[in-house]
Every structure is written in structure tokens, then in C-alpha cells.
Image: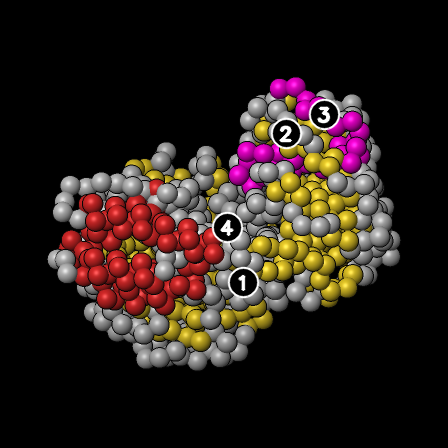
Amino acid sequence: MLSGKRLPSKAVLTAFVRACGQSDPALWQEAWERVSVAEDRAHASRSTPTRRQRSVARPAHVIGEPLTGHTDVVRAVAFHPHGHLLATGSTDHTVRLWDPSTGHLIGEPLIGHTDAVYGVAFHPDGHLLATAGSDRTVRLWDPATGQPIGEPLTGHTDGVTGVAFHPYGHQLATTSSDRTVRLWDPATGQPIGEPLTDHTQPVRAVAFHPDGHLIAAASRDGTVRLWDPSTGKPIGEPLTGHTDAVYGVAFHPDGHQLVTGSFDGTVRLWDVATRDPFGAPITGHTSAVLGVAFHPDGHQLAIGSFDGTLRLRDATTGQPIGESFTGHTDAVTALAFHPDGHLIATTSVDKTVRLWKLASYEQGPQLLQQRLQTQVAQLRRLRHSQIKVYRERNALASQVQDLASKIATAEAHQMHASRVQISWAVIGGPITGHADGAYGVAFHPHGHLLASTSEDQTVRLWDPSTAEPIGEPLTGHNAGVIAVAFHPDGHLIATASYDRTVRLWDVATRDPFGAPITGHTSAVEGVAFHPDGRLLATAGEDKTVRLWDPTTRQPVGNSLTGHTESVRALAFHPDGRLLATASEDRTVRLWDLVTRQPVGDPLTGHTGVVYGVAFHPDGHLLATTGSDRTVRLWDAATRQPIGAPLTGHTQSVTALTFHPDGHLLATTGSDGTVRMWDPVTRQPVGAPLVGHNIDAYSIAFHPDGHLLATASEDRTVRLYGQLWNPKAV
């Protein structure tokens, strides 16, 4: 099986090629597909194709009938980040939502614009849809309900032609025929800074760099300009080379290239660092290029043209991939890739939307063998692959079944022979800077920042790769800061304090995000964001749990009451349906976030204060820690304890966290140690890690799982890293 961290041996792959090599190519292809299917059933989850595998995808074939409903030219298209919605904007003044899996319309059209809709874009977490109109406004919508959010964003003095969200979601960029680019705060609807005014003709399209540090805008003046969105300053000279208006612009997923499409019928690639052209212009369309987009893996480029066709190109060589795709009866105006890359959506002057499905090239066995051999290192990193056993009626069925068995056996032997034991160790010296005990620690979702909080009333940001501070401490609380959490999209930090407030901070600027959140009548002990970022939960010494809208900073519903002592910690279930809270009353409670009612009776078993609570990443387990020196595991569905408590800490266990892939549980406590546990066997993994000499209060894994951080009363933050020790079993 091509899964996990091991591959079938070269001998097994060679056997596969020999078995199939003499077959008819069509039968060979079918045989290989069956082996893939057979592999898929033996494992629980599907692996993501490697970059190289995806790059051999061939042009799409159209799926079903055109999507109809708009009554005029369809100008814009975007997929929801989760892929389950497609939004389109039209000259008929409406925005429509579609189910891309069925092609069916979802709900009624979104009506509000009084003129053509030229741009649509989803917020990175999917909770907002922004639309740009020729009526000079930008509108925000809730895609779940189809309802407008707030008043239209006004400021442009001519039609708004394009819209894009910052990758972190805290900024919105728009382009206009008034020759400007504007930045907005989507939370408040207010403009950010002055308009960007260097273009000499209408600006047609805009895109953010994947890390958010650049904006690219394309204009009818034939140029593309780059700006720094944090300062509003232009970066270098405009990109010139097109001989007519530029209508399309997009960044490569890794940010090193920019692609532009023009009315001159060409597509150009640019080196973002040098701003120089990358190779010769890409030609082939017989008319203006209106839309360009990179495949999510960056290996293909899709181009839509006024000539009514869609073409795919190799993003490295610029060479065509297959023939052009026809289906629209008029100009293709816009296009977008599905987030997983298997679909392309196109819009047209013909008033329709079309979906195209990418398919795989039929490869010969020799080519596939070569390709697999070059992928070994990459495929070893893949953790999951589904193996399905499935019988077809043809001459190769039994051979394929036997081959799948051989592959599985070979991999099992290989995994046994080279099993890796992972151990952890303190890395580097303590991270110092706080002037009093460090209470909270959290990693940014992208892993490039580490935040810590302290009794010294500050929040500090650190570079976890260097352990160096980033900027000045965040100040504003007037008492010790107990807890910290990052918004799921990384643009906000929430902090909780003894001063009875919660504060939000803009990660990019490190400025406070609005006024403090008030409502608790005593110290705020814990803070957590809902997985979709729409809610913020806080735990109070006042025995309550409160929910807030992080955008408006207003309470959402009434407080959750039921605990009889201080609430010390809380955690959202990964699917967002439940909230777990831990209290000094020795109980853990689960809450239904729809009804705001407790789910069943409290979880009892701890004989002292419950300090920590966390859900396993797949949601089936709940783990808790307490002053009784134990860690307890619970079945999240039945709320029953699983096995005996985990013991080993010699003092209170104050905090815990699951590894992102769920195979480890890490705990820390007043004994200053970190302990690792296997949540399946409930056994300790390795020896305790000693990094602090007194109480540790908080613990967090890096998003990719290779680092662990703790915060302690000794005023320091410590980092722990993996050590890989190959041992034959």
C-alpha cells in the first residue's frame, strides 16, 4: 500500500509493472486503478496526492449541464474554502449560491446590489462572502443564511470591479474603475488607510500574496502593481510587458510567482522577488484573457478567454496540457479551482456557469514506475491512505487482488523492520523576558509565532524557530494575564486576565482590537475560540462561562451556569457542537452550544480542582487534569471514564494538550515536568521531561506537532522537540 510512512519495496513495484506490462494499456490502467482502490479500503483515511502526482492531471471534462439561473452575463465565481458552496455574481445584479456536487442552486439569489456584480470572494474561514458591484459598493453576506451583514461598504467613486480577502481574513481589498485599490476591515466595515492610487486607468482585479505581505492589482493601464498592505506603500516599479488591459491576476500557492492575463491575448508569469518576467509570454488564445488561476498544488495554470475556451498549462514550462475545453457559447469571464483541485468552475457571457472535472492521464507502466521511484521520499511522509478491496469482472481481477496483498505484506515487513521510536527532549535554553510568572502559552495556527502571558500584565510574542521576541510586549491589562488563544485563522489573539476582562489583539499590528470585553465579575481564568472562529468562550472565577462574538465583542446569549465554584478551563469539541468546562467544584461539564444547556450530568471522578480539559483531535476522547495529581480520559459520547486514571505526576496536574495527530497526550504540572502518554494504551511514553524547577501552568503543541511549549512560574517559556531514534524491533 502506498500509505503511512512506508512504501512497498522496489521488488514489489517491479512485480506490479511486470504483471501489468504485457497487458493492453486500457486493462493496465484499470488494473492500477484497482490496486489503488484495493489499497484504499485497508486504511481509514485518504492520503493527499503528492505535488508530482497532481501535476500529471490532464484537462477536465465538463460535468453535466451548464448551471443556469442568472439572467445576464455571469462575471465572477469563487468556491467556499471548504468546497461545499460555489458563489457567482452577475450583471443581473444578483449573487447566487450553488452546490458544486449537484449543480443545484441553494436558496434564493442574494439581492442587494443595484447594478452588475463584478467580484465575489469568501473569507478564509468561510463565514463571510464579499461581493463587489458596479453600484460602487461592497457587500458582506452570511453564506449560511444568505442574509446581508451590516451596511454596504462605500467609498469608491465608481464601480467596484474586484474583491479579495487577506489570507488571515482581517483585511479586505477592493478594486474599482475609479483607478484605486481600497483596504477595509471586514469586522467593522471601515476603510483602512488611504486609497492606493498609482494606477492611471480602471483597476480590474486584485490578489493577496499567500502570506499576506503583498497585494497585486491589475489595471486597464496595462500594468500590475504591488503594494505592502500594512503600509499602503507601492513595492517597486509596476510590472510592464502586456500591451493591453490586464484583467486577471493570481499568486502561485507558494508565493514565488505571479500570473497575469491580458486583453492582448497573452498570459505572463513574473518572479515576485525580482518582479521580472518569468519566461516568455504564454500564447494560444485567439482573444483576450479574462481569467487566470493556479491549481492549489501550483503545478497547473488555468486560463479563461474571450474566445470561449478554457485551457490548462504547465505552470513551470507554460506548455499546454491537452486540448482547449469548449462548452461555453461565448466569452469565459472568470474561473476558480475547487480547494482540493478536482474541479474548475467557469463563468461566461452566455449567462451560464460550467463545472469541469480534472482527470488523470493514462500512463504506461514504465512511466509510472519511474514516477513512483522519484516519489518515494515524499510518499513516506504521507500518513494515511484508504485501501478498498473491490472485485470487478475481468481477467485481471484475481491478479490485482493478489498484487494488493503482496504490497500490503511487503509494507508490513518494511514497517516492522524499520519502526521508529520517537523521544522528546528540552531544546535550547529557557525563553526569558517576562518579569513575573508565565501563565499561558499558545502557538499561532501557522506555527510562526508563539504567544505567552504573565503575571507581569503583558503578552509577549516569540519566534519559535529562534526563541527571540517579536516586537514589544502587548500591554493593556492592569492585572496578571492568565490565558491566551489564537483565532483559528490567526489574525486575532484573545487574552484573559485577573482584571476581569478579555482583550483581543490584532496579530499583524499588535494593537488592541477594540475595547476590552467586560462582563465577568471576577478573574477570567480561561479563553478559547470556536473552531470556526465565530464564537469566543471565556471561563470565570465568577462560576460562569460566557460566549462572545469576537467581531463585535458583544455577548452571545446568556451565561452558562451550573458550576458551583470557579471555572478554570474550557475547550470546544473539534466539530464545534459541544463545549467542555473544568471547575474547582471537581467536575467537568459538557454544554450543547445550540440549546445552551448542559449535556447530561457532570463528569465526576477527580477528587480535587479540575485544572485542565482538552478534546482529542477526532473528538472521541476528552482528557482532564486535576489537583489530585491525575489525568483522566473520558468517552466524549457516553461521558463515561475510560480505564483508570493516569498517574505519575507528583503534584497537581495543571494543563494538558493532545498532539495534532492525536497519538500523544502531553501534560504538565506543579512538579515542573512534562509527561507524555499514549491515549490508546494509557501508558507513559518515555521519561518525564524536566524543564522547569517549579510550577508549569500551560502547555501547547506546535500545529505540525514537532515542538511543544510550556509556561512556568519560574518566569520562563520552554520548548521541547522530537528526537528520532531508529531502533530495530
* Classed neighbour count for the residue bearing mark 4: other residues with Cα under 10 Å, few (<14), some (14–19), many (≥20): some
Q: Is residue 653 above or below residue 6?
A: above
| Closer to the eye: label 1 or 2 | 2
Judging by the rendered image, the residue that carries numbered circle 3 is 605
The residue lying at 51 percent from left, 47 percent from top is 125
Q: Name which of mark 3 and mark 1 comes first in the sequence.
A: 1
| Residue 116 percent location from the top left of the image | 36, 50
Label 4 to label 1: alpha-carbon separation: 12 Å
Which residue corresponds to the image point at 57% horizontal and 48% vertical from the top-left? 660
Say whether residue 617 is magenta: yes
Q: Residue at x 35, y 36 (%)?
A: 106
The answer to which image quadrant residue 462 occupies is bottom right
Q: Residues within 10 Å of mark 2 (few under 14, many from 20)?
A: few
First along the sequence among labels 3 and 4: 4
- Between the residue at mark 1 and the residue at mark 2, the CA separation in whole angstroms equals 45 Å
Which quadrant of the figure has residue 459? bottom right
Q: Residues within 10 Å of mark 1 (few under 14, many from 20)?
A: few
Are the residues at dot 1 and dot 2 in contact (C-beta closer than 8 Å)?
A: no
**Amino acid residing under circle 2:** Gly
